[in-house]
């Protein structure tokens, strides 16, 4: 045996004290690192979205889209890494959703948001007069994983708000809490309600009164008196210190009328915004919510413990009548999720250990089980996992659904090298080698092929690690954790496994030295004949394999497509939509009615309702609903996960049976990047009416598909509006201006701001308006009195006519073009991308007739899936290059490397078969599994080809070398494949990882068989190997 070359296994045995020391240190270090790993539900990823809002009271949706939205969008187009600029404009307001490209560096996001603020700030002076804003929200992706609800019995809203502020202050002191936001707040207002007729009788001008109030409360600088010794600030009295001060304000009367006290002619009171804009409810009560987000890099489990302690302490301190309930508990959800994954990991470990014990230690002559070889592999597993945890802690990779799933995937692979090394040691011990010689030989013969195979397997996950997309960032831990575990498993196999084998394996007694006895059993004899037959009938074997490969590719057409599966969390997200323009009061009435009906269901644990807006982002992939008066979102919490699906069906039936006038949706929480609807098409063009017309045709085509449910678009219906047709000639003759009419209608109907009331650190807007009974009917408009420039008032009907019309309630734009998104849910049992693929070709006829500038594109899950797939595909050339380079380094032959590489795609045969057989969808996670299969299969192939080459170099005839190499590598190849496949069984039950596990299991099973049978045939055909003349000649080539 050559001792001149460095042998790491021999070095480990020659330095056993150091080896023992490293073994103990790494185990303890890994154990300590495991408990230091941060835990969360999802891996962190950068939200590359900023929301910009502006308000222009009085403007129509189309006016604000052209005069405000377009100017903001134009500036955003110049921002580096700009991808999508989507906006929706409503009467009086606009919201622009600015999204960066997935390829934008995460570290530069903050600087880009600064650039956005600067660029839009530069055009602020070009916006129309009266525009408020723009306002920026670059914390759109903040997750409020814990939400509490404060309700009051016997306390008014002001008192409840004060207690909410106190609780917020206490929660901000809890370690790892980054932010506490109050949810469902009602803004305070001070209202001055007046009777218009009485004002007219007294000759009071509404606008003049408003100006007097504003001037009285104005806070302006009043100078500094500089004396030889002091600087004395001059302060003026007169600002409103209380509502009573406002009531006691004395107004100047017109035309010599005595001064009038405001409280004598108007009702002044402190209240809340009316009409209400949004509200949060919990189990039928109005509440104030407290949403808590965690600091970056925090441990959600530790945060949960701290919050539970604070929660119990605060509940005890609150007075009787103030209730504090927990609405969302992400730490508990994470603990449950991590616990489930740990159980799955333990199951996988047990399965792999069973495979190792049985396959390596089972002897048939006589029948007995030697646990020693399996024990060597068993001890390797915790060591590799411990060191993996250590490096995860160093690189900042926490425990979450991606990293834990990757650990389970890696588990079936990380024992491969240990099994190969132990199997070789056992075989050499059976041949009569000493322990040192067996360990040393195992390194010499298998270390480099194993390293090449390990690196190739890791390279199969490389496209995920390098993918420049949000999905790639989300799933990065699959590559990082798997690659770490694989490389560490090789190091363990060549350093620690020989040491453990040296301690635990026993040498063979008498009769040792019969080198091939282990392969002379009846089983191996039959297998040898099978391989010999495949080599002889190589053309037939290759042809059958190619046909199977073609059928496998064709079979993928029938596999359901998917982006990401739904989450296993129990919450049901119920959306309730009413027609655009519906009042908040009407929407709240319907939401309460829904609560009352579904709250009676025995399987409902709690109901949390958000009226006028959607739920805050309590779960990272949650799709957000922006504030609007015609929507409510209800979080229905089932009593248990087991009853979730049955409860969902009952909620859907309830919506169809008792709320047919609502557009109701019942969704499960998703996985992966948020997508609003599973089926979406986007109609884009330069004209609003044109895109609406085309969208109606797309909707008709979607409704014709029996697999769609609830087809709608994001422009919704036109809204009713009152148009004042002003007779300009009469108005001029009477001295009435359009501005005067607008200000009076604003004051009477909605209220006009006349100043701010300062209460401590609060600034409360003062609004002047008429009482509700003077502004709740269309006829009230006709009775409105408009001031003239002579000081008199005239009825509005003298200068204007009121007509009822309609206008767009919302206008969506896509990158400065008008854009309508047509969307739909799908029936149970089918995936959104599948339905999209059914509808998309049927829109080609409509696309062929589109006017210039118009287009119809796929959106939603299919669009995001395409982007994610493209980001993976973009890295495949590098992956192929690395794998091929590794093959060249190991095999030193281009033809052999090419031959081995061609076996990689054969896993598609089994992957397609198992996905179809088990009705698993082909989603992004399954694609990752299939991509990773390439490395797993090539790993086994390179080990087999390397064995053939070793035998040929040793003087064995080519034919014999091919057959005998397959026989000798049968056990390690089957063992490693069995470990990987069986380790996937617990993972196959996971909603998230199931499709990937199924694809890997099926692909690896078929590919392993083909490695042992097809690869020998391919090798013989590739190199035109002929049977030796003295060999068995019964089979023709």
Image (cartoon, rainbow, N blue to C red):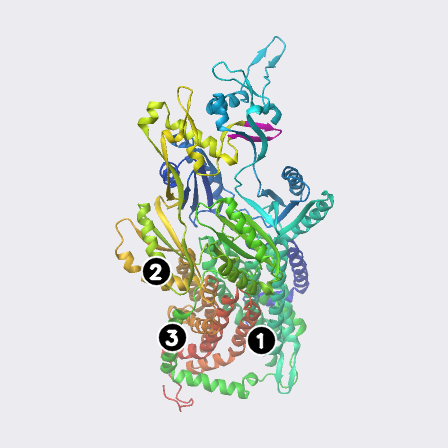
**What residue lies at 51% left-to-right and 87% top-to-bottom?**
525
**What residue lies at 63% left-to-right and 86% top-to-bottom?**
511
Quarter of the image for residue 701 reads bottom left
Number of marks? 3
How far apart marks 1 and 2 lie (CA) works out to: 62 Å
- Where, quadrant-wise, is the N terminus in this rendering? bottom right
Whether residue 752 is situated above or below residue 139 in the rendered picture: above
Q: Which residue is mark 3?
A: 551
Whether residue 170 is situated above or below residue 908 in the rendered picture: above
The mark nearer the N terminus, 1 or 3, is 1
Magenta extent = 756-768
Q: Reply yes or no: does residue 762 show up in magenta.
A: yes
Q: Secondary structure at mark 1?
A: helix
Res. 506 visible in picture: no
- Where, quadrant-wise, is the C terminus in this rendering? bottom left
- 239 vs 863, nearest the viewer: 239
Residue contact between numbered discs 1 and 2, judged by CB atoms under 8 Å: no
* Numbered badge on residue 701: 2
Q: Secondary structure at mark 2?
A: helix
Q: Nearer the viewer, mark 2 or mark 3?
A: 2
Quarter of the image for residue 535 reads bottom left
- 331 vs 728, nearest the viewer: 728
Q: Reply yes or no: does residue 683 show up in magenta.
A: no
Q: Which residue is mark 1?
A: 423
Whether residue 269 is situated above or below residue 592 in the rendered picture: above
Quarter of the image for residue 534 reads bottom left
Residue 248, percent across and down?
Answer: 60, 22
Specify the principal SS of the magenta part: strand
How far apart marks 2 and 3 lie (CA) works out to: 32 Å
Whether residue 143 is situated above or below residue 439 in the rendered picture: above
Q: Nearer the viewer, mark 1 or mark 2?
A: 2
- 504 vs 815, nearest the viewer: 815
């Amino acid at each position: 045996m050559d001792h001149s070359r460095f042998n790491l296994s021999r070095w480990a045995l020659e330095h056993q004290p150091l080896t023992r020391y490293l073994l103990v240190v790494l185990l303890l270090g890994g154990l300590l690192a495991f408990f230091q790993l941060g835990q969360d539900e999802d891996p962190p990823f950068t939200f590359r979205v900023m929301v910009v809002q502006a308000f222009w009271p009085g403007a129509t949706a189309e006016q604000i889209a052209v005069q405000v939205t377009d100017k903001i969008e134009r500036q955003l187009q110049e921002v580096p890494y700009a991808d999508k600029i989507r906006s929706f404009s409503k009467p009086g307001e606009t919201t622009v959703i600015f999204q960066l490209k997935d390829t934008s560096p995460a570290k530069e996001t903050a600087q880009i948001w600064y650039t956005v603020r600067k660029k839009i700030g530069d055009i602020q002076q070009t916006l129309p007069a009266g525009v408020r804003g723009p306002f920026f929200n670059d914390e759109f992706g903040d997750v409020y994983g814990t939400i509490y609800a404060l309700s009051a019995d016997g306390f008014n809203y002001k008192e409840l708000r004060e207690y909410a502020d106190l609780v917020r202050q206490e929660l901000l002191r809890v370690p790892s809490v980054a932010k506490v936001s109050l949810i469902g707040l009602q803004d305070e207002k001070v209202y001055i309600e007046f009777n218009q007729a009485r004002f007219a009788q007294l000759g009071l001008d509404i606008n003049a009164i408003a100006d007097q109030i504003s001037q009285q409360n104005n806070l302006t600088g009043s100078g500094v008196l500089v004396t030889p010794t002091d600087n004395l600030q001059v302060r003026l009295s007169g600002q409103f210190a209380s509502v009573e001060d406002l009531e006691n304000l004395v107004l100047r009367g017109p035309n010599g009328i005595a001064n009038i006290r405001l409280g004598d002619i108007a009702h002044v009171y402190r209240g809340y915004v009316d009409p209400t804009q949004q509200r949060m409810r919990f189990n039928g009560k109005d509440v104030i919510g407290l949403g808590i987000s965690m600091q970056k890099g925090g441990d959600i489990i530790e945060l949960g413990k701290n919050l539970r302690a604070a929660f119990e302490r605060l509940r005890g301190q609150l007075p009787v009548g103030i209730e504090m309930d927990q609405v969302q508990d992400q730490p508990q959800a994470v603990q449950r999720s991590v616990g489930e994954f740990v159980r799955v990991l333990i199951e996988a470990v047990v399965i792999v250990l069973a495979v190792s014990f049985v396959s390596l230690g089972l002897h048939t002559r006589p029948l007995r089980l030697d646990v020693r070889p399996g024990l060597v592999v068993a001890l390797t597993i915790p060591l590799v996992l411990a060191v993996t945890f250590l490096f995860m802690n160093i690189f900042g990779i926490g425990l979450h659904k991606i990293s834990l799933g990757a650990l389970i995937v890696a588990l079936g692979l990380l024992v491969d090298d240990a099994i190969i090394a132990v199997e070789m040691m056992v075989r050499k011990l059976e041949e009569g080698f000493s322990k040192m010689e067996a360990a040393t030989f195992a390194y010499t013969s298998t270390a480099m092929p194993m390293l090449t195979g390990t690196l190739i397997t890791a390279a199969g996950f490389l496209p995920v690690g390098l993918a420049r997309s949000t999905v790639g960032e989300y799933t990065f831990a699959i590559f990082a954790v798997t690659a770490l575990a694989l490389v560490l498993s090789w190091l363990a196999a060549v350093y620690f496994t020989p040491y453990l084998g040296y301690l635990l394996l026993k040498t063979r007694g008498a009769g040792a030295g019969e080198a091939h006895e282990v392969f002379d059993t009846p089983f191996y004899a039959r297998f040898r004949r099978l391989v010999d037959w495949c080599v002889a009938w190589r053309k037939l074997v290759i042809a059958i394999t190619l046909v199977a490969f073609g059928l496998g590719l064709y079979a993928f057409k029938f596999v359901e497509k998917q982006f990401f599966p739904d989450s296993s969390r129990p919450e049901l997200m119920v959306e309730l939509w009413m027609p655009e323009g519906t009042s908040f009061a009407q929407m709240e009435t319907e939401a309460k009615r829904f609560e009352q009906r579904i709250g009676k269901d025995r399987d409902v644990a709690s109901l949390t309702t958000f009226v006028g807006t959607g739920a805050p982002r309590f779960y990272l992939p949650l799709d957000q609903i922006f504030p609007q008066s015609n929507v409510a979102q209800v979080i229905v919490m089932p009593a248990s996960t087991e009853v979730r699906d049955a409860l969902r069906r009952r909620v859907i039936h309830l919506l169809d049976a008792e709320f047919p006038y609502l557009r109701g949706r019942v969704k499960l929480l998703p996985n992966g990047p948020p997508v609003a609807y599973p089926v979406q098409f986007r109609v884009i063009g330069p004209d609003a009416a044109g895109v609406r017309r085309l969208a109606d045709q797309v909707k008709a085509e979607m409704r014709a598909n029996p697999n769609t449910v609830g087809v709608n678009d994001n422009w919704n219906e036109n809204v009713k509006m009152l148009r004042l047709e002003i007779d300009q000639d009469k108005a001029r003759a009477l001295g009435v201006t359009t501005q005067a009419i607008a200000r009076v209608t604003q004051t009477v109907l909605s209220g006009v701001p006349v100043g701010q009331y300062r209460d401590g650190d609060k600034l409360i807007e003062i609004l002047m308006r008429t009482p509700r009974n003077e502004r709740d009917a269309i006829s009230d408009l006709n009775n409105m009195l408009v001031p003239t420039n002579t000081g008199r008032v005239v009825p509005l009907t003298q200068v204007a006519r009121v007509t009822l019309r309609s206008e767009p309630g919302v206008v969506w734009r896509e990158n400065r073009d008008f854009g309508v998104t047509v969307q739909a849910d799908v029936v149970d049992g089918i995936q959104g991308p599948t339905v999209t693929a059914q509808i998309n070709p049927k829109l080609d006829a409509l696309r062929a007739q589109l006017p210039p500038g118009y287009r119809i594109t796929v959106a939603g899950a299919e669009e995001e899936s395409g982007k994610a797939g493209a980001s993976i595909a973009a890295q495949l050339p590098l992956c192929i290059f690395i794998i091929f380079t590794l093959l060249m380094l190991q095999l030193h032959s281009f033809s052999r490397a090419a031959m081995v590489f061609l076996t990689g795609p054969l896993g598609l045969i089994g992957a397609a078969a198992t996905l179809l057989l088990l009705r698993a969808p082909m989603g992004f996670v399954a694609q990752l599994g299939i991509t990773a299969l390439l490395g797993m299969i090539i790993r086994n192939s390179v080990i087999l080809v390397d064995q053939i080459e070793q035998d040929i170099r040793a003087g064995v005839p080519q034919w014999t070398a091919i057959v005998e190499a397959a026989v000798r590598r049968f056990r390690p190849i089957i063992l490693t494949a069995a470990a990987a496949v069986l380790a996937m069984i617990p993972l196959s039950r996971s909603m998230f990882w199931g499709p990937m596990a199924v694809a890997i299991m099926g692909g690896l099973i078929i590919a392993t068989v083909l490695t042992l049978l097809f690869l020998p045939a391919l090798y013989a055909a590739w190199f035109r190997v002929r049977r030796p003349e003295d060999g068995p000649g019964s089979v023709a080539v």
